[in-house]
Amino acid sequence: MTLLGFKGVHPLMVLFFPLAAAAVLGGFWLLKRCHTRISTRLRHGYYWIFGLLCLAGVIVYPLVASYDSYRVLYFVCTLACFGALNAALGAALLFGYVARPHHHVSSRRRFMAGGMMAAAGSLVSMAGVDAATGEGREVADRRITVKRHPDASRGRELRVSLVSDLHAGFFLPTSHLQAAMNHIVAFKPDVVLFGGDLVEYELSALDETESFFRQLAGLAPVYAVIGNHDCYIDADAVAAFHRGNGVTPLRGEAEALQGPWGRFTLLGLRDVMETADNWQCALEHDLASTIMLVHNPQTVLDMPAQSAPWLSLSGHTHGGQMRLPLTGTLINQADRRIVAGLNAIDGRRIAVTAGLGYSGLPVRLLCPPDVTNLVIS
């Protein structure tokens, strides 16, 4: 399902529209329904705050309109502010901060109501700080073991570390990079692969990741593909940054991975934002020994099964970034069957990493960032 340009959206997300309307207009419904219980002062205060929120929204929107991720964050924060205003009005009705004849609101009830609202505000504030900084959130070490194709050359196991989706410039915690580096160093890979989306919206954010990639290049050969967000900014500049830090960008190109593990071909595809049907170059290689690195796993599902290499590696989806216990991912940005980990879908085998950064919202719910370490035996 596609909704507002987002792919792989859970059907329950259609509830967003009535909920958004309720968050903005719910207060007016309360004012009308409970008009006999609401004092003039409270009513006027609500109108003033509502008007100021609208004015602030109009002023801020032009500042974020050109940035996709900040635009999503803007709408969510705006709805949250209107929702908080309506919640405060509801609390006022619930705890008696209204005009009622011959009714006295005890100081104890006022104290309890104020304390509960203050505690709720503190929790929301702390959650916002945690979401924005990401400090203390663990980066998972996802381990996947895959048996090579029977027709591939034999040898010892090939160890591959896959990282992706840093989205530098959008709340990328340095702790994520350090934790990822620790996992990779401990794994001792033969090759490191980067799955794209290095930056979010500005090339100046590349500086945040320079040390990270230089360290990776000192551990093992590093190869990278370009992601859709890199294409939004400047794919050539991102590729040049990779080359300057010891990383080999692959844009429809292949590299031979030959060693004691046998011989594999690493094929890096261009993103669909650069060219359509970019998987055609896979037909030029032995599919039984080709490892295909492509940013968007949807590309693998869009190619004929008989043309797909035996193993593909991707990022892009962030594992959904936010998952609910019963419904799973809310927005997957690809086929909803694709999850973080090893997928076997329609005759194709795709290993997907949840990435290290954020997009849209600086929040991960039941979907921690990860480094995907593969052992190809």
Image (cartoon, rainbow, N blue to C red):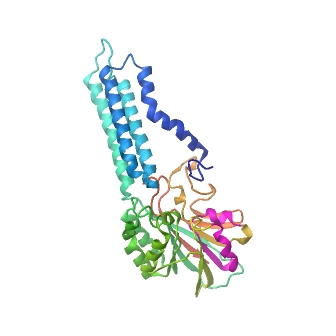
| Residue occupying image coordinates x 27% and y 29% | 111
Q: Residue at x 67, y 63 (%)?
A: 301
Q: Position of residue 259 (x, y in %)?
A: 58, 87
Residue at 54 percent across and 48 percent down: it is 325
Q: Position of residue 349 (x, y in %)?
A: 66, 67
Residue 231 percent across, percent down from the top left: 51, 66
| Residue extending farthest top | 102
**Above or below, 192 relative to 231:** below
| 301 magenta-colored | yes
> Residue 338: which quarter of the image?
bottom right
x, y percent for residue 171: 39, 59
On the question of residue 88 being in view, the answer is yes
Q: Which residues are magenta?
A: 276-303
Q: Which one is nearer the viewer's eye here, 345 or 115?
A: 345
Residue 31: image quadrant is top left
Residue 309 can be seen in this image: no
Residue sitting at x 60%, y 57%: 334
Relative horizontal placement of residue 345, taking residue 271 as reference (left or right)? right
Residue found at the very far left of the displayed protein: 107
Number of labels in the image equals 0
> In front: 310, or 277?
277
Furthest toward the right, the residue is 306
On screen, 107 above or below 170?
A: above
Q: Quadrant of the C terminus?
A: bottom right
274 drawn magenta: no
